[in-house]
Amino acid sequence: MSLAHRIIPCLDTDGERVVKGVNFVNLRDAGDPAALAARYNIEGADELVVLDIAASRDHRPTFLETIRRVAAELAIPLTAGGGVANVDEGRAILRAGADKLTVNTAAIRNPPLLTALAAEFGSQAVVLAIDAKRVGDRWEAFVRGGSVATGIDAVEWARQGVDSGAGEILITSMDKDGTRSGFDCPLTAAISRAVSVPVIASGGADTPETFLEVFREGRADAALAASIFHDSIQGLGALKRYLGENGVSVRQAG
Amino acid sequence: MNVALVEYGAGNLPSVERALRLLGVESRRASTPEALSGCDALILPGVGHFGALMRSLGERSLVAPLRDAVSRGTPLLGICLGLQAMFATSDEAPGDTGLSLFPQKVSALPATDRLPHMGWNQLRRARPSKLLEGIPEDAYFYFAHSYAALDAGEAGVAYCDHCTPFVAALEQKNVFATQFHPEKSGPVGAKILTNFLRQAGNKV
């Protein structure tokens, strides 16, 4: 008996539709979030993440409606985020039906935000999302959808974020994102060793072997992927069977 | 049937309501003492902080009515923080008193593994259980917490191990509770809710 490693499909949205791109650019439409959510719920996803990658204030009501539509399809936990800058915006996302929220840019600019969110909703509801890119011999955190360098060491930021109240880290490798060349195991392992909270690896998912690697070498507690699931390149059931056969504790679907 | 969800300003009512609706049961929200009486079953959902929950129940004068409903035999299901609230005290809020349906305390899980305990885990059955009837021994349930009751005496029907063994499900007469979230635990979670509603006389 042990805690299962989680497989988490991610719906990157423009607020309303699922979109996808490579290395954070060249976005194209990839479907209706509620329809995909319904599919993943049945196929055995352990959790779902829905992000508003445009995160403009103007269409926030549209994204909240998307969260409601997605949540209505799920009997599994939902994490949502994108542009959350204060406690009220966090509350709106949780009220719309999310169980956890992600914060990224606003937390780097204003680390006490993590403390405020954790005090209000509990650490278990606060996921610190970090977009990291290899720069020399370390990883640097980027903000605003990966477009702005911060000069902050991603591993150090993860440690600080947890001290401030984050209950989970979602680490996205910008070098790997959208490339289908495997997760960034060294980055994930560095984060995993630095913090005491669960770590979700993101960016580079491809074959079942890449998931096995990120659970073993990357010491990830959960792995997130988007296009390989949306495009039916990888089925959740087959992926979990493979991981189970290779000694990774997973929750088999159904 | 008449199922009331105790509303205290936090908690995850919509997801519990949705899970019940999928079972064909429309619930209502109860935030006053009057609303707690005359229902077939009560559910105390919970996310957040032990102290905040107890203070919020206190401000709404719901503590005594909840205990009275339990004494009258109304089936009560506590979920996550709702389970913890049934105990006397919690490490999370040393100054606050719980519903004290059970005399033991809620403890911080020792940090020997990753915390919060977040994700899907299995149960170890300790006693026959109405709540877990018909559920496979190896089923996974969704947990998200850093505090837990380590002991519930005879009421502990299933335990989970993360950092230390803790009470994952308890039942005593008409009182039921799970540390995991049945409303987030897929088909086996729905079965838990079905089993609870059957205790409240639901024919489903």
Image: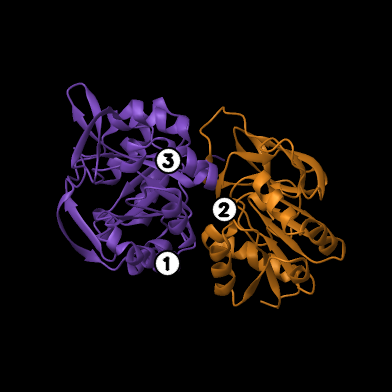
Indicate whether B90 appears above or below A11: above
Q: Which residue is mark 3?
A: A113
Q: Chain of mark 1?
A: A
Is B31 on the left or on the right of A49, as rendered?
Answer: right
- Which tint was used for chain B? orange
| Quarter of the N terminus of chain A within the rendering | top right
Image-quadrant location for residue B92 = top right
Indicate whether A254 appears above or below B146: below
Q: Chain of mark 3?
A: A
Q: Which residue is mark 1?
A: A68
Looking at the picture, which amino acid does disc 2 mark? Ala
Q: Residue at x 56, y 27 (%)?
A: B112
Q: Counting residues from the N terminus, which is met first, the one under dot 1 or under dot 3?
A: 1
Q: Is residue B21 visible?
A: yes
Q: Secondary structure at mark 2?
A: loop
Letter of the chain in purple: A
Q: Nearer the viewer, residue A187 or A146?
A: A146
Q: Residues within 10 Å of mark 1 (few under 14, many from 20)?
A: some
Q: Residue at x 41, y 48 (%)?
A: A86
Looking at the picture, which amino acid does disc 1 mark? Arg
Query: Do the residues marked 1 and 3 share a common chain?
Result: yes
Closer to the eye: label 2 or 1:
1
Looking at the picture, which amino acid does disc 3 mark? Leu
In the image, residue A32 lies at what x, y percent?
A: 29, 68
